[in-house]
Structures are given as structure tokens and as C-alpha cells.
Amino acid sequence: MQERIAVIFDFDDTLGPDSTTGFLKHAGLQDIETFWQEVGQMMSDDWDPVPAYLHHIMTAQQDGRIQGLTRDALKAWGEQVPLFDGVPQVFSLLRDIAHDANPRVSLEFYLISSGIGDVLRHTSIAHEFTDIWASEFDYDAQDNAIAAKKIISFTDKTRYIFHIQKGIIGSSSRGKPFAVNKKVAEDQRRIPSQQMIFIGDGYTDIPCFSLIKKNGGIPIAVYDRQHTEKWGNAFQFVADGRVSNLLSANYQQGSDLTNFLSMAVRSMAESIALASSGYQR
């Protein structure tokens, strides 16, 4: 029994408000609604959602609607990105709960997002994650974004769950896109699926919800209390049986979400202890 638990988060509308919309506002875009409508029009012309929005951000830079689509500008915005209530404290809280339930268990946090990596790697909580996977820009000699070099959307997200399972993580795993295809026996996987919790909010998370649930882990959908127009989409995840629970994205101690995460982590840690002792429930 591998004595590790993985708690895997999406970012936008899961740990904080949409960081890409926030960057666009920060970079001077005047009409956010029109920007996303234009992305929607690209999708109707058979663009996939993530390459559509990445390409359209570069277009907005070229036509002067935003300023400073550079690595440094994205980093600077990442350092300011707001988070939902309680997010900075939830990591240590869950680590303490795992240790209390089973001191041998290692609790690891991961981030898999369709957002922009140069933003997310510079948030105030980036150091909490064992690894972060997100969409990436390539830059010219003047540090301007010129192309999307990595796109993470829908089933792309599930690829990184397999990275976590097989231990293909950290800087040494970069530049090895085919490493995830290596065959690893179930009992040799670094973190099996049944010891994973996935928290997300949107359509790009559906494949991860399904994969985690199918393989015995715990998928949790959250919704932003400030955006009621998205609640119906979130509830549909429950109606379709894709998630174990739907909770408000409030991570303060004592909230329903933090209580549920705490119970899930404790249950997994205790199950690992029992399995390691040879006892079966």
C-alpha cells in the first residue's frame, strides 16, 4: 500500500475567481464580455475552447486592446491573484488531519488547470503544490507571448492524473511528453486513484471527475457563490452522477467544503493504516 494521498485542484473558479479574466482586466481590456463572446464565436467555428482563448489573448495584444502580454506581466498578475476565503489555510489544515489520522501518510497537493502557467506558478499558494500543470505561452526575445506551446483542456487534464499516479512529477519530468505512456503495475503506482481527491468546477473538469470516480477516488464539484449564473451547470454534475458532492467554494475552517475535505482525507489516511496493518474493513 502506497502511503500517499493526492488532493488535486483545478484553479479558476475553484481556488479563486477566474485568473484569466482578472489578467485581462488588469492589462486594460475594456470590454470583457465582448472578449469572451468572441472566443465563443471562435468555438462555433470549430476552435477548441482553450486554444481559442489563448490565441485571442495574443490577438488582443496585437490590436492594442491589452498591454503587456509578457512573462513578467503574467508573473506580476499571478502575485496579485485573489483567492477564495480560507484557501491559504486549507493546506496546513488538511496536512494536520492526515498526520493525526496516520502519521505515516504523506499528503500531496497538485494543480491541473486550463489557465496560464506563468500566472499560476506565481500565486501566493504555488509553493503548496508538489507540481503544477497549466497552459503555457512561448515568448520571443522581447518576452512577448507569441504562441501557445502547451494546451490543457478536457481530457488533457486526465493525462496529468496519470503523471501523479506514476510519479512523473517535478522538473525532471519536463520535456518528456511520452513518459506518461510507460506501463506501471497497479501495485507499483506512486499514488493509486483510490487515494486521490479531485476538486473542480467546470466542464473542463468532467473527464477528471469521471476518471477519479470510476477508479475509487473522490471527485468534488465546487461553485462560486458570487456567480449564480454558473450554479445550474455545477448542479448538473451532481444530477449526472459525476461527482460525490457539490459545495460552495468556501475553504474557511468549519465550512461544508472544508469539513467534507477533512473527512475525506481522514478516511483515506485511516484506510491506508488499516491496509498496511493487514486489516480489511
Image (spheres, helix red, strand yellow):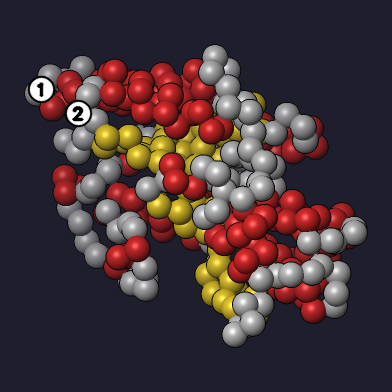
Left or right of 24 on screen, residue 266: left
Name which residue lies at 65% across and 57% down. 76
Q: Residue 104 carries which label?
A: 2
The circle drawn on residue 277 is 1
Place of residue 184 in the rendered image (x, y in percent of width and height, measured from the top left): 20, 56
Q: Identify the amino acid type marked 1.
A: Ser
Indicate left or right for 20 with 134 as reference.
Answer: right
Callout 2 amino acid: Arg
Q: Quadrant of the N terminus?
A: top left
Q: Residue at x 61, y 83 (%)?
A: 140
- Count all numbered tags in the image, as a single digit: 2
Nearer the N terminus, badge 2 or badge 1?
2
Q: Residue at x 27, y 35 (%)?
A: 106
Image coordinates for residue 45, horizontal then vertical, percent: 76, 72
Q: Position of residue 112 (x, y in %)?
A: 49, 51
Q: Residues within 10 Å of mark 1 (few under 14, many from 20)?
A: few
Find residue 135 and name its label: none
Q: Residue 104's quadrant in the figure?
A: top left
Q: Quadrant of the C terminus?
A: top left
**As drawn, which residue projects farthest toward the top?**
254
